[in-house]
Image (tube, rainbow, N blue to C red):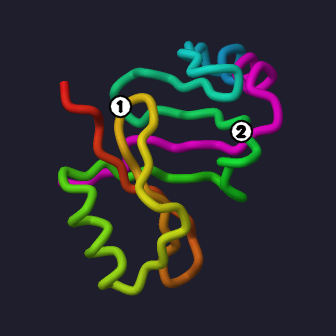
Amino acid sequence: MARINYVELPIGNVAVARRFYADAFGWTFTDFGPDYAATMTGDVDLGLNGDREQATAHLLPVIEVDDLEGTLAAVIAAGGRVTLPIFSFPGGRRFHFADPHGHELAAMVPEAS
């Protein structure tokens, strides 16, 4: 079943944001390069995206699905608009879309283990 498993925040400075969430909540982060860090709890994780070229304008909820291409087709058929086509990232593949109200979300499938 599809579920929100990740929330990505567009941020200006990964180190500052990382320190804030670690100090405030005791969270630990894994670095994925200089512009990205994420919690890796396996529940609903938080990503800190400091890459200005890939950062969204707002918080990005990410929905884990079983079939990325099928979900892409369903999103389009339901009236969604693709804002970023399917791409690979460390941990899987995803695409971004806007719902009919303009909210941007992402759908992703994890890497096969």
For the residues bearing labels 2 and 1, Cβ distance under 8 angstroms: no
- Check disc 2 and give the amino acid type: Asp
Q: Is residue 30 magenta?
A: no
Residue 43 - label: 1
Estimate the x, y position of residue 96 in percent, counting from the top left. 49, 60
Left/right of residue 69 with respect to residue 101 in the rendered view: left
User: What amino acid does circle 1 point to?
Assistant: Asp
**44 vs 31, nearest the viewer:** 31
Q: Residue at the location (52% across, 44% down)?
A: 7
Return the mark for residue 51.
Answer: 2
Is disc 1 surrounded by few (<14), some (14 to 19) or many (20+) residues within 10 Å?
A: few
Query: In which quadrant is the C terminus drawn?
Result: top left
Depth order, front residue of 83/63? 83
- Which SS class for mark 1? loop
Q: Looking at the image, how many numbered discs can be counted on the residues? A: 2
Residues in magenta, as a range = 1-20
- In the displayed structure, 31 sits above or below 2; it is above
Q: Nearer the viewer, residue 2 or 54?
A: 54
Q: Is residue 67 left or right of residue 57?
A: left
Report the residue at 25% width, 52% height from top.
65
Query: Mark number for residue 7?
Result: none
Number of the front mark, 2 or 1: 2
Q: Helix or strand or loop: what does disc 2 sit on?
A: loop
Rendered residue at 65%/48% (across/down): 54
